[in-house]
Image (tube, rainbow, N blue to C red):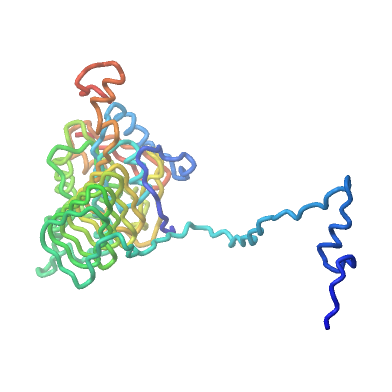
């Protein structure tokens, strides 16, 4: 027959701790959780020149992809990002989204988009509300109209670049704010 | 020179920290001359350099870019017709390398050392074409080597700031053509429209006004 447990022996670990706690005694310090320290970062030796990082275009799930074997002729309008790895001939309208021409992409088109990133070949005028980004493998023949341009050394570009500044886009509002009340033609 | 990546943000002025190039007396005069031009229309005939593009866009320029110097250096044979007894430079093929530019529309053309690379006989024809794209009051900016400079045809020039230029030599090849003198340029441009600035680099910086 098993021996009955004697509750006064204080064999249990919690009972020992409770016994030590007398009224007025200081509570033992609570263990405080500390977040694990991040591993020390090893800084590589500084290089004398800036390395060009040209990440290749990814294939995000929320974008349309024209694959390498696709040859498209016509007008394309979409409400999502577009990645072109094949051939495109026509017009592209993606006013609120970006167009990426992959390294294998060959585009003969007028492009209207929020942002255009070029790794491949584009022959045609580009209008981008935010930015045109020509990477070092990019080859562009055409005129760019945009708010900002990024070009890597090594890229090929022949054409014109015209920066659309905000002051040019909303002259009437600026004129009104200045209290001129004119037609805005004198701004600048 | 190692290629670098540059983000071109036209709203920001070019950093003065980048200005390790040589001050250019011609560009100093040039930008004073264009001081009241809000949006100059500029054709850059030199190699595409992020720095040059950045500087010019920061000055609010509408930029026409067409590198015609690299094809001259790298594909020189394409511009020569060797079918006859003496090779003939194909000027029309060469002029086709320029980007499309409306006539009499440009404020300035940056030719760099273009005229040192061309056969001396076609210099007037090319200069006339460039002048035809330039608006009245417009300027051609170019450099001519001094007679004592025999090598350096493959130098590349670009802007590090509005008034400072930088050069790099890819090799040390000799110049293939005789020196173009200022007198020969004066035959092409209107009288009194040439401004010559002497430098220590062995090249004269020249502005030709239309």
In x, y percent, where is residue B125?
Answer: 14, 48
Residue most toward the front? A1
Q: Is residue B115 visible?
A: no
In the rendered image, residue A131, in percent from the top left (x then y), is placed at 31, 47
Question: Quadrant of residue B60 in the image?
Answer: top left
Quarter containing the C terminus of chain B: top left
The quarter of the rendered structure image containing the N terminus of chain B is: bottom left
Q: Which residue is drawn at 22% across and 36% down?
A: B107
Residue name at image x 20 percent, y 23 percent: A185
A96 shown above or below A3: above
Of residues A107 and A91, the one drawn nearer to the viewer in this rendering: A91
Residue A187 location (% of width, % of height): 26, 24
Rendering quarter of residue A146:
top left
Residue under the image location 83 percent in, 50 percent down? A27
| A187 over B191 or under it: above or below | above
Whether residue B101 is visible here, answered yes or no, is: yes
Residue A6, horizontal then vertical, whole percent:
87, 70
Side of B187 relative to B3 (left or right): left
Q: Is the residue B177 above or below the residue B192 in the image?
A: below
Number of marks present in the image shown: 0
Nearer the observer, A180 or A25:
A25
């Amino acid at each position: 027959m098993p021996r009955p447990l004697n509750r006064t022996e204080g064999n249990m670990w919690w009972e020992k701790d409770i016994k030590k706690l007398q009224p007025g005694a200081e509570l033992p310090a609570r263990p405080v959780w500390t977040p694990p320290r991040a591993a020390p970062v090893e800084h590589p030796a500084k290089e004398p020149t800036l390395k060009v990082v040209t990440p290749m275009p990814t294939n995000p799930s929320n974008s349309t992809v024209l694959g390498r074997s696709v040859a498209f002729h016509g007008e394309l309008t979409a409400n999502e990002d577009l990645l072109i790895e094949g051939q495109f001939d026509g017009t592209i309208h993606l006013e609120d989204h970006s167009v990426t021409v992959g390294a294998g992409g060959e585009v003969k088109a007028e492009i209207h988009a929020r942002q255009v990133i070029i790794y491949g070949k584009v022959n045609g005028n580009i209008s981008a509300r935010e930015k045109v980004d020509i990477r070092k493998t990019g080859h562009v023949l055409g005129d760019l109209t945009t708010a900002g341009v990024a070009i890597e050394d090594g890229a090929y570009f022949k054409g014109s670049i015209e920066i659309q500044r905000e002051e040019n886009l909303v002259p009437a509002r600026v004129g009104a704010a200045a209290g001129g009340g004119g037609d805005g033609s004198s701004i600048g | 020179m190692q290629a670098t990546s540059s983000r071109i943000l036209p709203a920001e002025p070019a950093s003065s920290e980048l200005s390790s190039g040589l001050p250019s007396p011609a560009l100093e005069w040039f930008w004073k001359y264009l001081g009241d031009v809000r949006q100059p229309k500029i054709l850059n005939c030199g190699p595409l350099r992020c720095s040059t593009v950045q500087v010019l866009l920061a000055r609010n320029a509408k930029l026409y870019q067409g590198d015609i110097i690299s094809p001259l250096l790298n594909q020189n044979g394409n511009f020569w017709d060797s079918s006859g007894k003496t090779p003939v430079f194909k000027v029309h093929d060469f002029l086709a390398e320029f980007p499309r530019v409306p006539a009499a529309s440009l404020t300035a053309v940056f030719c760099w050392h273009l005229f040192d690379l061309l056969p001396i006989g076609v210099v007037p024809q090319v200069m006339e074409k460039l002048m035809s794209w330039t608006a009245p009051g417009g300027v051609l900016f170019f450099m001519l080597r001094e007679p004592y400079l025999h090598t350096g045809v493959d130098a590349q020039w670009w802007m590090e700031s509005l008034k400072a230029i930088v050069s790099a030599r890819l090799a040390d090849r000799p110049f293939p053509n005789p020196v173009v003198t200022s007198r020969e340029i004066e035959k092409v441009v209107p009288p009194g429209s040439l401004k010559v600035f002497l430098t220590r680099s062995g090249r004269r910086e020249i502005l030709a006004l239309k």
